[in-house]
Amino acid sequence: MSIRPILIHPDPRLKKRCAPVAEITPEIGKLAEDMLETMYDAPGVGLAAPQVGVLQRLFVMDCVKEEGAEPRPMVLINPEIVRTSDETNTYEEGCLSIPEQYGEVTRPERVVMRWMGLDGKPQEEEFDGLWATCAQHELDHLNGKLFIDHLGAIKRNMITRKMAKLKREKARG
Ligand code: K2U
Ligand code: ZN
């Protein structure tokens, strides 16, 4: 297993629509394993493949937050939302690709998702709470969408300018 570098916004690869996973190869298995290790190390509760520079439709998540509870690492390949609730909730979101920036995002409170597991078997499950927010945040990543795209233009542009400045200063060393 290895920890992979996480792309930081602005980066054109974070704005691209990812391609479906055509075949579940050993490389996809290794990628999923590395993504989980990278997510836990960050730490985060989710991570999408484009965030480690792989423009394919898969993400990982583990939203178990209770101290001492059994973790539940999940790998979702070619995920899609098949149903959403009318009820919504609003969450102060962050993103591992936009460090230390936060904004309120309103999303459906519950989602039913369908995906392919690493074992090649189709899965379907309803998520609520942080799991629902995280799954929708990660699915956005696969469509080249960031949580700041749900914010107003002024806040979005302020965050983008701040991140671009940070990247320039980091590049200068
Ligand atoms: O995709 C990512 O950048 C991972 C996010 C997923 C996420 C964002 C907002 C709301 C839920 C999930 C990271 O996990 S951000 C860090 C974090 C940690 C604990 C709770 C919420 C967010
Ligand atoms: Zn994110």
Image: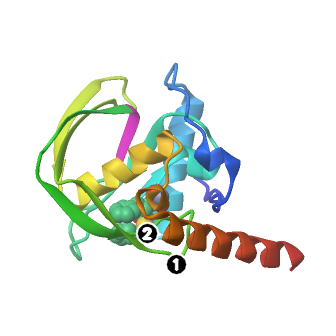
62 or 105, which lies in front?
A: 105
Disc 2 residue crowd, few under 14, some 14–19, many 20+, Cα 10 Å: some
Q: Is residue 75 magenta?
A: yes
* Amino acid at the residue labelled 1: Glu
- Taking the view exactly as shown, the residue that stands out farthest to the right is 172
1 or 111, which lies in front?
A: 111
Q: Is mark 2 within 8 Å of ligand 1?
A: yes
Task: Identify the secondary structure beneath mark 2.
Answer: loop
Q: How many marks?
A: 2
Q: Is mark 1 within 8 Å of ligand 1?
A: no
- Please tell me the numbered disc located at residue 100: 1
Residue drawn at x 61%, y 55% as measured from the top left: 2
Q: Which residue is mark 2?
A: 94
39 to the left or right of 170: left
**Prevailing secondary structure class for the magenta stretch in the rendered image:** strand
Magenta segment range?
A: 73-78
Tell me where residue 149 appears, x and y as whole percent. Answer: 47, 56
**Mark 2 touches mark 1? (CB < 8 Å):** yes
Tell me where residue 72 appears, x and y as whole percent. Answer: 28, 54
Tell me where residue 98 appears, x and y as whole percent. Answer: 56, 67
* Amino acid at the residue labelled 2: Gly
51 or 27, which lies in front?
A: 51
